[in-house]
Image (spheres, rainbow, N blue to C red):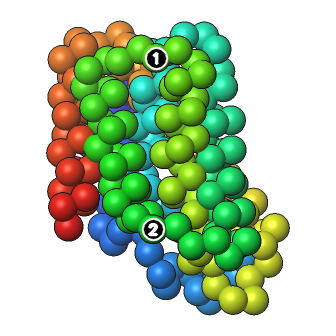
Amino acid sequence: MNRVTKLLMTVGLMLTASVAVAHPGHGEHTGGFLSGLLHPMMGLDHLLAMAAIGFWSMRQSAGMKRSAPLFVVGGMVGGAAIAWAGVSLAGIETGIAMSVLLAGVLIATMAKLPTAIGGSLVALFMLTHGYAHGAEMSAGTSLISYMLGFVIATLAITFVGRGLGAAMMKADNRISRAMGGVIAVIGGVLAAG
């Protein structure tokens, strides 16, 4: 089995883990670390955004390519910290859906952005996801364990996207553009829902 096939199978399995959008009630009885680890994988919106950002980052400048995982984790932790501080943010679900849509558009158009702009955009996307994770942490859960779990899951999903993005650089660009288009459409459906 070649590398692209393995990566596509991995992404497929991750996407079929659950069709639920990541929202309250994930892993309430699984403890801090496991709950944090599972939360990003339990929603199609989270999976697509993180994997799409990883995929897109592979066609960026060397600086953006190297730093994308840091922007992803920084945005996630920042968003969770805002939620844990008790700050209420409106439109988080819309922001999450829009992050999927825009990440798909970035792939479909093969947009190349300067590191400062691309990194800021990625961090903003992930802030909405991190806020959702932080707001949905069950009472009594260990904050550090939960955060460690969702950071590991976030990095794993992002690196799967990066692996697929690297493999697809050798394929016809129309395939990557089509994948981006599908992700953007799914983001649009999530935003409309």
Q: Give the x, y percent position of residue 124.
A: 53, 44
Q: CA distance from mark 1 to mark 2?
A: 28 Å
Image quarter of residue 109: top left
Residue 65 visible in the displayed image: no
Q: Give the x, y percent position of residue 106.
A: 33, 27
Q: Tell me the SS state at disc 2.
A: loop
157, 180: nearer the viewer: 180
Q: Which mark is residue 113?
A: 1
Image quadrant containing the N terminus = top left
Q: Which mark is residue 46?
A: none
Left or right: 86, with 142 as reference point: left
The disc labelled 1 sits on which kind of residue?
Leu
Q: Tell me the SS state at disc 1.
A: loop
Q: Which mark is residue 90?
A: 2
Q: Residue at x 57, y 29 (%)?
A: 119
Residue 108 against residue 82 in the figure, above or below = above
Q: Which is in the foreground here, disc 1 or disc 2?
A: 2
Left or right: 135, with 161 as reference point: right
